[in-house]
Amino acid sequence: MDEILRVGVVGCAGKMGREVCKTVDAAPDMVLALAIDRERVGESVREFTSPHAPDLKISDKLSESLDNAGEVHAIVDFTHPKFAAHHGMVALKHGVTPIIGTSGLS
């Protein structure tokens, strides 16, 4: 794959979200394109990834962030079952592939 995959993480400040951010940051063919969480808004994802990660500020506004982030290929959602479907629909409306990792969906 020649193209760099631009990934957003929704629920980035939670346990699994932080791990996804670290994994994306360490991958040679991926870059962290946006970070969404209702906690830690305004903080940098560097605080829980690495000092070499993009200096992305955490936002709590998925749609607005997708509008302003440039090209995003996929979002990985590790939030709450109550919100995951909505986040997936927002991603699809922006032409972004949603990957839902949230547990507890039925």
Image: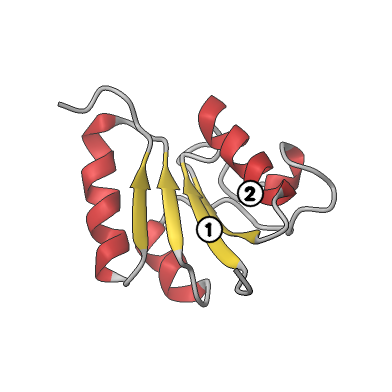
Location of residue 14 with respect to 70 vertically, above or below: above
Residue lying at the far front of the rendered structure: 1
Q: Name the spot of residue 41 as percent of width and height, x first.
A: 56, 46
| Residue 21 left/right relative to 52 | left
- Disc number at residue 105? none
**56 vs 3, nearest the viewer:** 3
Residue lying at the far left of the rendered structure: 106
Q: Residue at x 83, y 53 (%)?
A: 52
Q: Quadrant of residue 78?
A: top left
Q: Quadrant of residue 57?
A: bottom right
**54 vs 100, nearest the viewer:** 100
Location of residue 67 with respect to 61 vertically, above or below: below
- Disc 1 to disc 2, how far (Cα)? 7 Å
| Residue 92 left/right relative to 35 | left
Specify the quadrant that holds the N terminus.
bottom right
Three-letter amino acid code of the residue under disc 1: Val
- Dot 2 corresponds to which residue? 24
